[in-house]
Amino acid sequence: MKKGSALTRSATSGAAPPEQGAPGPGAAPEGPGPTGPSRAVRVLRYLGGRLFTAAVSLAAVLVTSFFLFRILPGDPVRAMTEGREVTVEQMEELRRQFGLDRPLWQQFADYCLGVLRFDFGTSYQYRVPVAELIAERIGPTVLLAGTGTVVAALIGLVLGTRAAWRRGSAGDRITTAVALTLWSVPSFWLGLLLIVVLASGVGWLPGLFPTSGMATPGVEGAFDSALDVAHHMVLPVATMVAVVYAQYLLIMRSSVLDEMGADYLTTARAKGLRDALVLRRHAVPNALLPTVTLIFLNLGRVLGGVILIETVFAWPGLGSLFYSGLRVPDLPLVQALFVLFASAVIVMNLLADLVYPLLDPRVRT
């Protein structure tokens, strides 16, 4: 009876019986559940992690650049005095001037402090500060590497897109086969071949381009000088493009093939859009993301990759300067260039990590 009376009073009063686990009267309301870190905090963590990784990589580069070239065969002082009559005292004085008589740990400490001040020492063979040599030679290298990268990227994007859109056709097979063949060819061998065929001339074919250098002596005027430099750039740029563009072609082809099966392309076709518009407005923008990342990464690598090309064509850039420094060995010069080449790769990797989330919202933190 008591149990029935309680239920009857509850029903007649219109108040529902309290649910199991519900807070009773007077209980404090529950606060909001725990939330994750804000977007700003996540962005700062992402940036901090990438910057920390870049700093550790730069520190490893400094250590490697110092000790790696210390194990190269040859004595810098003997190389500098080769063919000259010098006494033992004079050679010891040269070692003292260049700091080669100090303990190895002290040389490393001086080297690290100098790098922090952007002071890479004095070149053994040129007897001028290394920073001045780099400043003189970096322009031709950036011109050559930048032009080659832009041309290779454009050719690779266009041919890769066409090959993917016409997958399995004769054009697709020929384009891919040629790209893979050129990609496997050593750049120095291809450069020498182009010099023999297009610069020196073969049979009835005359030499069309200069064999070496960046400019012809005696050319005056801004317009004539620019044309002369462009004429000298044809073969080095062609060599670089032939070896590099295959990467962009294959990545772009693979990206477009992945996008071709997407639902939004089917919807665009169902709306009556022509294939050319579907390709240009929908497929290509989404397929560009991996290729843009590859371009950033290659911008760092191509700076050090022009060493062989500049050596073959006697291009007055950092690559030929690095090669001349290795023959001595010119320790301050090769160390500074090694740090520069490696730092370019690290910085471009960092930029790729920072830019990619801006281009693709799906990977934003």
Image: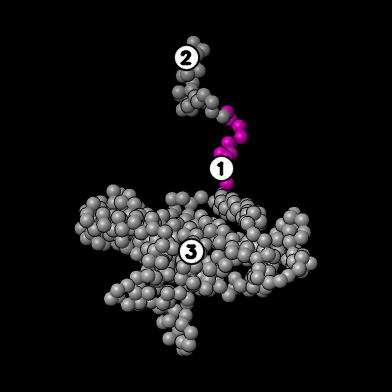
Q: CA distance from mark 3 to mark 1?
A: 55 Å
| Distance between mark 1 and mark 2 Cα atoms | 46 Å
- Residue of label 2: 4
Circle 1 or circle 2, nearest the eye:
1
- Where residue 179 sits, quadrant-wise, is bottom left
* Image disc number at residue 308: 3
- Res. 276 image quadrant: bottom left
Name the image quarter holding residue 271.
Answer: bottom left
How far apart in space, not on screen, are marks 2 and 3 (Cα)? 97 Å
How far from the left and from the top, in percent, is residue 83?
A: 65, 70
- Position in image of residue 278 (x %, y %): 27, 59
Apparent side of residue 86 relative to residue 300 in the rendered image (left or right): right
**Foreground: 186 or 364?**
186
Residue type indicated by callout 3: Leu
Q: Secondary structure at mark 3?
A: helix
- Say the numbered circle drawn on residue 35: 1
Start-end of magenta stretch: 24-37
Specify whether residue 32 is painted magenta.
Answer: yes
Q: Residues within 10 Å of mark 1 (few under 14, many from 20)?
A: few
Q: Amino acid at mark 2?
A: Gly
**As drawn, 58 above or below 96:** above
Q: Secondary structure at mark 2?
A: helix
